[in-house]
Amino acid sequence: MKTDSIEQYVSLRAALLKEKSALEERLARINRALADASGPDLAARSAPARGRGGRRAVRRRLRNQPSLREVVLAAVRSQPLTKPEILAAVEKAGYRFTTKNPKKSLDVLLYKKGLFRRVGKKFGPAR
């Protein structure tokens, strides 16, 4: 009786390992096909995150060119601007924020020592 249970376990385990290998190979072929069809980033972006059981998708950080610092410096180069004016200029320049509150990101940059000088409620380059 014990040998029958052990043999049954071994055969089921072998079948599961074989099925797992086949599924991994199929997934690898799907990823290669997706990468060929629309660039190498698609497969990486759509892969589930490790940890937490793979329930969350990987979310890559948006990379803007030029940086927020460069865009703000260009906006205030000609004349000092208020925070709302700077934010409007940054968005008009095409900079995309990933945060729900872009004003906080702007505040961090504006109040960083040595980058900008404050003139009343307006900010200009530190020179």
Image (tube, grey):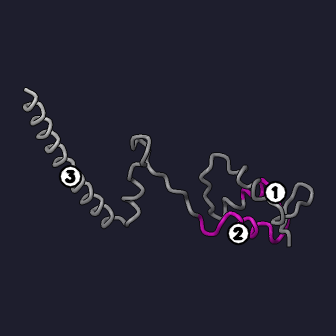
- Using the numbered discs, state the Cα–Cα distance from disc 1 to disc 3 in whole angstroms: 55 Å
- Quarter in which the N terminus is drawn: top left
Q: Given this view, does label 1 or label 3 mark the residue nearer the observer?
A: 3
Kindly state the secondary structure of the residue where label 1 is placed.
loop
Q: Which residue is mark 1?
A: 111
The image's mark for residue 32 is none
Q: Which residue is mark 3?
A: 21
- What is the x, y in percent for residue 84? 77, 53
Q: Which residue type carries mark 3?
A: Ser
Crowding at dot 2, Cα within 10 Å, few <14 / some 14-19 / many 20+, comes out as few
Q: Given this view, does label 2 or label 1 mark the residue nearer the observer?
A: 1
Q: Which residue is mark 2?
A: 70
The boundaries of the magenta stretch are 64-88
In front of the other: 10 or 76: 10
- What is the x, y in percent for residue 98? 59, 52
- What is the x, y in percent for residue 31? 30, 59
Crowding at dot 1, Cα within 10 Å, few <14 / some 14-19 / many 20+, comes out as few
Q: Main secondary structure of the magenta part?
A: helix
